Image: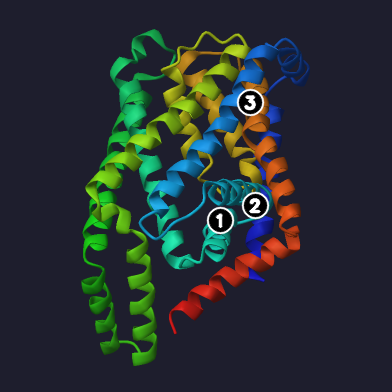
Amino acid sequence: MKAHFRTIIFLALAILLFAMFLGHVNLGNVLAEVRHARFDLLLLALVTTAATYLMRAYRWQYLLRALGPTRFGTAFRTTVIGFAASFLLPARAGEFLRPYLLAREEHLSATSAFATIILERLLDTVTVLVLFAVFLLVFDPGQSPVDPKVFRDVRVGGLTVGIAALVALVTLFVLAGHPDAVARGALRLERVLPAGLAHATSKVVHLFVTGLSAVRQPGRLAMTFILSFPLWLSIALGIFLVTRAFHMPIPFIGSFVVVAILVVGVAVPTPGSVGTFHWAYQIAVTAFYGQPADRAAGAAIVLHAISFLPVTLLGIVFMAREGLSLGRMRGLAKLAGEQKQEETR
């Protein structure tokens, strides 16, 4: 019941945000901007976006080698299904389904595979913050309509989040280097928890830390971090191409701030990032580069479609080939949790 209530809340929020997004622009002008967009650049953006999922699958496969051999085809297929599920289902279900489906097919621990997803997200955060820092180094707020005070706040916020991400990365490095010690520490919960529950908790912790085993291999971690840059530069290129397709003279490096603000915006788990994605993009290009709101709105709608619709359609194709319906996907999300419990016995 709580899950259904949460779904209704986020769906209502998405509808409200998107309605507000459309409410403050002239829809006729927005449609005109879409019609006048350069189709060749939009097509290139589509190709670039498709390439990002190949890069995601390769990076994930590289991380998973610490757990056991995996096939690239499996990593790519489950990656696409995971992102499609996150678009179609509430509560970012794809983040749980992706490692579960791969672990089931490749005979790996689902809990350990899920740990690699967390590591991916942490590396993504650090990479985006590095790109954002590059933007801050070259951006001149004096040549922009952005309020200098707002720019200072953004700079401080980016630095704070960057430090937190680095601390988390170091923490994971320490934990992954001593999985047995962490599990023994979890066993001490017997002092405050029933012995059976404490033992189960210890085993979950051990499995999770084992999934972070890539972190305790400096060379593998460094390579994974390096692989994150072409991935996010490709995402930035897709954003840049759509922005230029709408005749907005924003430099490529300007897409770095758009990426950073989009990451913050889509952190609100509305279905398909509807509303939050659109607002984030529009705020970035209007606040930092003074672009017209109607033009930014048209670009936001097209960029959202390019970013989410193709991968969702391909994900549906892969789901059909696997015999998976939306109802079955919901069931698998529940089953993933049950398997984690089973691994603790």
Percent across and percent down for residue 101 are 58, 60
Residue 126 vs 117, above or below: the answer is above
Q: Alpha carbon of mark 2 to alpha carbon of mark 3: how far?
A: 20 Å
Q: Nearer the viewer, residue 15 or 319?
A: 319
The spot of residue 24 in percent (x, y) is 67, 25
Q: In terms of image quadrants, where is residue 140? A: top left
Residue contact between numbered discs 1 and 2, judged by CB atoms under 8 Å: yes
Q: Amino acid at mark 1?
A: Arg
**Residue at point 34%, 91% (across, down):** 195
Q: Is residue 4 visible?
A: no
| 325 left or right, relative to 219 | right
Q: Residue at x 45, y 15 (%)?
A: 252
Q: Is residue 11 left or right of residue 244?
A: right
**Nearer the N terminus, badge 1 or badge 3?**
3
Answer left or right for 107 relative to 227.
right
Crowding at mark 2 (Cα within 10 Å: few <14, some 14-19, many 20+): many
Front in this rendered view, residue 143 or 325:
325
Q: Which residue position is annotated with label 1?
A: 98
Mark 2: amino acid: Ala
Q: Are marks 2 and 3 in contact (CB under 8 Å)?
A: no
Residue indicated by mark 2: 85
The C terminus - image quarter: bottom left
| Image quadrant occupied by the N terminus | bottom right
Secondary structure of the residue carrying tag 1 is helix
Q: Which residue is mark 3?
A: 46
